[in-house]
């Protein structure tokens, strides 16, 4: 529960709090679920589900009202243009819906449908609203950064009165089969159907219509005022004859005592998308639940609600639920053996997605045998354009790459930010911070960042300090800096609405706050009490926001201060569904309803921009953590999964959620280690550290009411076990950084689920509790259950696998589970044969102190005695890597030679070396550990190393196979510079 006791209270405030409290005092689980809408409580969702029911019930006799007159269709320069006509009454009146299908150079197709009358602004708004009249068409401005170049080579392969076929993509192997009546688009690859839009005729674009005032029904005595009181949740049974045309929520909608004025009437967009032969679909974060998404229209183990995307502050969220959470990425991938495809639904409004699966047998005689499963999806958004991107794969890597070309890839992180973060709500004073820092050192626990939650401020006025408790923030920052540590401070988007607070005064006087439907500054309730919200859709607001972070403006901050953006869904305690009213107005008069899911990203973006300009001449990679996000947020920083609980179930729920973030383009993700609410017992906390040490974003955090739980607080043996997990994270930092580099290059997930690495192995498609770390071959399955001593690990191929710690060669069978020993002190980790990965083995206090340490290479040989790996290094802080200031190596052990070469074939002097690169000359390869070393090396005592034209002899220690332990060899010290070419000759 939120700490409402912290708020400073006025009368209106008390009133609000009473409302909040009254809803908190209902039974525990019901609280959260009833605070948020179900589909039947959301007018447009209910109407579209009803529309789908009608269509499906009518089967082949269903006549969808959408068609393209062939004379209105044309194709030119990679684009198909036409008008879809929607028949809107019995007289055959139609609404014009301009459609453009663009075939992009990347092989992605984009289908955009608008509505002519709204496009021309020829509609009337109700309630004297100042809102824009068009469908929201700026989601692209926020989400898309590239990949839109049209492929002018795309060509028409068939044209007729009933449709048109377009060939495009690699070697013209992709085809879009556009049917005019009924309207649909089928996408094929190599002649085989993959995806069909409007397959079931569920497309529904609610056209503009004027409100027809009907005479109010006569009221019987005693009924006065009752209608107004009726909340949407109670309306379910009172709907008129045709539920898909149920007018009761067209012009106004009430939920939880809040009424949405809907000045533009009904305007939802919906479309069905069928994936042929695909049984698994993934993506559309953020939800808690399995990676392979469930069906949503009931049945065994299925959900009954659609997956919802409406960024919300859902505290104490329930697990395995399609309920919305803090962020939204409307990107879905579908997987079947050897094929991956995807769709991206670019819409920022409230969205619901239904998923159903159906067996289909092409040959009635082979009923049940080899019958394919089709996955049917139904996308429903409240407003905006219909804008869909279609990816035809064929591999997961192709799909993530194409999506990354559009929305951007993960920013190269600050190197420190992939170390461990120590947070709690709250460290209460500068002495407290220094004490935690000292204790981490005393117990030799590595960490990089300590965090300050909202209590560091003066009365929740951001950009200020509570100087009673934080007497000298600069001295605190300097103390941390002495051993390379950083401070992250929280800044939220709500600004205390109080006179005399310069941030608030400026926000008002400059007119940069979000407005209510009457055009006045919107006032709502959050941590500081009465608050306003900075409108980061406004470029002027972003510019002003940036100025607040300058070191001389935000006193007490310095070069090692970084940022945390929370509550940016936005969370409004007294708002509908704990957020802003949908009829609030943003910059350029877009309604909040249109942009809601992007709102969090705009705030994250403003803070990111601010950190790029804190001081003239200082250009460093920002680190900003966000809770709310949208497609594209990966370009700006990290996310975490919000307010989880200190329970085994929440520990188990975290990995699938983080994996889902990764395959949805936003891999810099983590969950609060230890669980936010509650107090984890020591075993749970240790298991959480073990799991967390493999989250891309690794932070311990705790609620203000939770007991202190820094890792040094643990009793032995728990403390040592947690410390070992943290140390493991630090030794593997070079591998993590390389995985982030790969994510930056092509959108690959940092931790990778089985379907992603092994798209041919159907047995792994639903596996979501284990993963590979980048391309290292390190396979991890954290223990997430109490009292466990063994762990079953699914083996996706017939490669050789070794235990990470013991080098035991494991007896594995492809597609079967292996039982690994997993007593509390063990994290079940395997090394897949065929990989080489880098480590730094000298224990240090922080990542920064490891910057110039030597490297260890671990080589896990495959069945044929070969292995290959990659290392990427840069200064971990600046943008100099964009100017070639980095080291990028490929390591290869083939036969009897291990070689390090430049991964991009760059020559030795290809760039003018800056200070960092020069210093890296002295950083060397220390040891090389070769696991599975051949018996032919057993007599060797030394080997020849050639580096920079010089030959030297290096000691080799060989350890014979012993029982199940594989033979291994340790070579060292190699001494070759990590950035140089070198070879080792084992012959
Ligand atoms: C909600 C966030 O999810 C949580 O992490 C934070 O501690 C509180 N807000 C207080 O800022």
Image: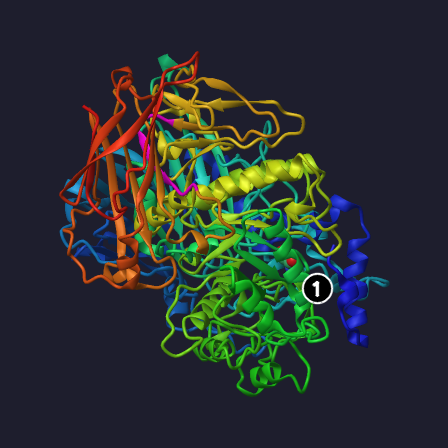
Q: Is residue 790 visible?
A: yes
Residue occupying the point 27% across, 61% down: 882
| Quadrant of the rendered image holding ligand 1 | bottom right
**Residue 671, image x, y percentages:** 57, 47
Q: Is mark 1 within 8 Å of ligand 1?
A: no
Q: Quadrant of residue 297?
A: top right
Q: Nearer the viewer, residue 675 or 50?
A: 675
Residue 713 appears left or right of 303: right
Residue 454 appears left or right of 858: right
Q: Nearer the viewer, residue 91 or 479?
A: 479
Residue tagged by mark 1? 428
Q: Is residue 466 above or below residue 221?
A: below
Assess whether residue 393 is covered by the magenta stretch: no
Residue occupying the point 41% across, 23% down: 802
Q: Is residue 53 visible?
A: no
Name, please, the residue furthest toward the right: 222
**Residue 743, image x, y percentages:** 36, 48
Q: Nearer the viewer, residue 94 or 1?
A: 1
Q: Nearer the viewer, residue 905 or 751?
A: 905
Mark 1: which secondary structure?
loop
**Residue 291, image x, y percentages:** 49, 36
- Magenta stretch: helix, strand or loop mostly: strand
Residue occupying the point 61% across, 81% down: 504
Looking at the rendered structure, the number of numbered marks drawn on it comes to 1
Q: Residues within 10 Å of mark 1 (few under 14, many from 20)?
A: some
Q: Quadrant of residue 423?
A: bottom right
Q: Is residue 169 above or below residue 605?
A: above
**Residue 860, image x, y percentages:** 34, 27
Residue stretch in magenta: 832-841
């Amino acid at each position: 529960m939120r700490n409402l006791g912290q708020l400073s209270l006025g009368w209106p405030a008390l009133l609000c709090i009473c409302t909040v409290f009254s809803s908190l005092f209902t039974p525990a689980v019901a609280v959260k679920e009833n605070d948020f809408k179900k589909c039947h409580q959301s007018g447009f969702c209910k109407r579209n589900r009803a529309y789908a029911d009608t269509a499906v019930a009518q089967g082949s006799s269903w006549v969808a009202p959408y068609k393209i007159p062939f004379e209105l269709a044309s194709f030119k320069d990679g684009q198909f243009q036409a008008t879809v006509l929607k028949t809107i009454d019995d007289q055959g009146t139609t609404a014009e819906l301009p459609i453009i299908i663009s075939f992009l150079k990347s092989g992605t197709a984009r289908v955009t449908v608008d509505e002519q009358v709204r496009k021309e602004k020829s509609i009337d708004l109700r309630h004297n609203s100042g809102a824009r009249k068009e469908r929201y068409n700026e989601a692209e401005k926020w989400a898309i950064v590239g990949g839109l170049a049209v492929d002018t080579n795309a060509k028409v392969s068939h044209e007729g009165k009933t449709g048109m076929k377009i060939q495009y993509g690699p070697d013209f192997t992709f085809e879009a089969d556009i049917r005019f009546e009924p309207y649909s688009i089928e996408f094929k690859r190599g002649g085989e159907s993959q995806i069909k839009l409007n397959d079931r005729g569920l497309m529904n674009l609610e056209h503009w219509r004027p409100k027809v005032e009907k005479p109010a029904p006569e009221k019987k005595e005693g009924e006065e005022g009752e209608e107004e009181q009726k909340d949407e949740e109670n309306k379910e049974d009172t709907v008129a004859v045709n539920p898909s045309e149920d007018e009761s929520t067209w012009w106004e909608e009430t939920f939880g005592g809040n009424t949405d004025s809907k000045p533009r009437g009904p305007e939802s967009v919906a479309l069905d998308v069928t994936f042929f032969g695909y049984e698994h679909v993934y993506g559309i974060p953020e939800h808690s639940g399995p990676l392979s998404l469930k069906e949503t229209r009931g049945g065994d183990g299925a959900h009954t609600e659609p997956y919802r995307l409406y960024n919300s502050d859902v505290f104490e969220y329930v697990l395995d639920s399609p309920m919305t959470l803090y962020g939204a990425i409307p990107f879905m991938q579908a997987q079947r053996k050897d094929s991956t495809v995807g769709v991206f639904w670019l819409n920022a409004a409230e969205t619901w997605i239904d998923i159903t699966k159906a067996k289909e047998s092409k040959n009635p005689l082979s009923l049940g045998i080899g019958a394919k499963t089709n996955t049917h999806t139904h996308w429903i958004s409240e407003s905006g354009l219909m804008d869909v991107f279609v990816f035809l794969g064929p591999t997961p890597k192709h799909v993530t790459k194409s999506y990354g070309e559009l929305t951007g890839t993960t920013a190269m992180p600050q190197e420190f930010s992939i170390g461990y973060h120590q947070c709690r709500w709250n460290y209460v004073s500068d002495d407290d911070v220094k004490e935690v820092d000292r204790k981490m050192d005393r117990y030799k626990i590595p960490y990089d960042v300590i965090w300050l939650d909202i209590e560091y401020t003066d009365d929740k006025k951001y950009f200020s300090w509570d100087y009673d408790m934080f007497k000298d923030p600069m001295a605190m920052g300097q103390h941390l800096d002495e051993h390379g540590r950083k401070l992250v401070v929280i800044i939220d988007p709500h600004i205390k609405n109080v006179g005399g607070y310069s941030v608030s005064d400026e926000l008002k006087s400059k007119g940069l706050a979000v407005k209510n439907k009457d055009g006045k500054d919107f006032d709502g309730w959050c941590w500081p009490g009465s608050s306003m919200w900075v409108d980061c859709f406004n470029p002027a607001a972003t510019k002003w926001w940036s100025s607040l972070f300058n070191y001389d403006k935000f006193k007490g901050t310095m070069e090692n201060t970084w940022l945390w953006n929370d509550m940016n869904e936005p969370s409004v305690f007294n708002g509908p569904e704990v957020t802003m009213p949908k009829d609030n107005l943003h910059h350029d008069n877009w309604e909040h309803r249109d942009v809601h899911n992007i709102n969090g990203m705009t705030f994250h973006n403003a803070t990111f921009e601010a950190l790029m300009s804190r001081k003239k001449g200082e250009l460093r990679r920002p680190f900003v953590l966000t809770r709310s996000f949208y497609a594209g947020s990966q370009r700006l920083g990290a996310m975490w999964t919000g307010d989880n609980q200190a329970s085994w179930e929440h520990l188990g729920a975290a990995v699938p959620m983080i994996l889902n973030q990764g395959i949805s383009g936003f891999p810099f993700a983590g969950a609060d280690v230890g669980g936010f609410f509650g107090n984890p017992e020591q075993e749970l906390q240790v298991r959480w550290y073990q799991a967390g040490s493999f989250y891309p974003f690794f932070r311990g955090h705790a609620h203000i009411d939770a007991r202190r739980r820094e890792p040094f607080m643990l009793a032995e043996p728990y403390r040592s076990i947690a410390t070992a997990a943290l140390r493991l994270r630090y030794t593997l930092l070079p591998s993590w950084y390389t995985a982030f580099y790969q994510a930056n290059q092509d959108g690959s997930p940092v931790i990778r689920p089985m379907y992603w690495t092994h798209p041919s192995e159907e047995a792994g498609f639903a596996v979501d509790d284990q993963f590979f770390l980048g391309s290292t071959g390190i396979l991890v399955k954290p223990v997430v259950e109490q009292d466990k001593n063994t762990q079953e690990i699914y083996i996706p191929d017939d490669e050789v696998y070794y235990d990470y710690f013991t080098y035991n060669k494991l007896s594995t069978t492809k597609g079967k589970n292996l039982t690994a020993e997993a007593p509390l002190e063990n994290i079940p980790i395997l090394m897949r044969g065929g990989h080489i990965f880098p480590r730094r083995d000298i224990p240090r206090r922080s990542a920064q102190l490891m910057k110039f340490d030597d490297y260890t290479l671990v080589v896990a040989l495959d069945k044929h005695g070969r292995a290959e790996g990659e290392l990427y290094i840069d200064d971990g802080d600046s943008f100099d890597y964009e100017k070639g200031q980095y080291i990028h190596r490929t390591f290869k052990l083939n036969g009897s030679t291990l070689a390090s070469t430049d991964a991009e074939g760059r020559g030795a002097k290809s760039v003018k070396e800056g200070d960092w690169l020069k210093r890296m000359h002295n950083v060397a390869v220390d040891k090389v550990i070769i696991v599975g070393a051949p018996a032919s090396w057993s007599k060797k005592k030394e080997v020849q190393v050639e580096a920079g034209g010089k030959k030297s002899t290096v000691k080799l220690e060989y350890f014979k196979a012993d029982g199940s332990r594989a033979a291994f060899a340790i070579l060292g010290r190699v001494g070759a510079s990590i950035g140089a070419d070198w070879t080792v000759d084992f012959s």
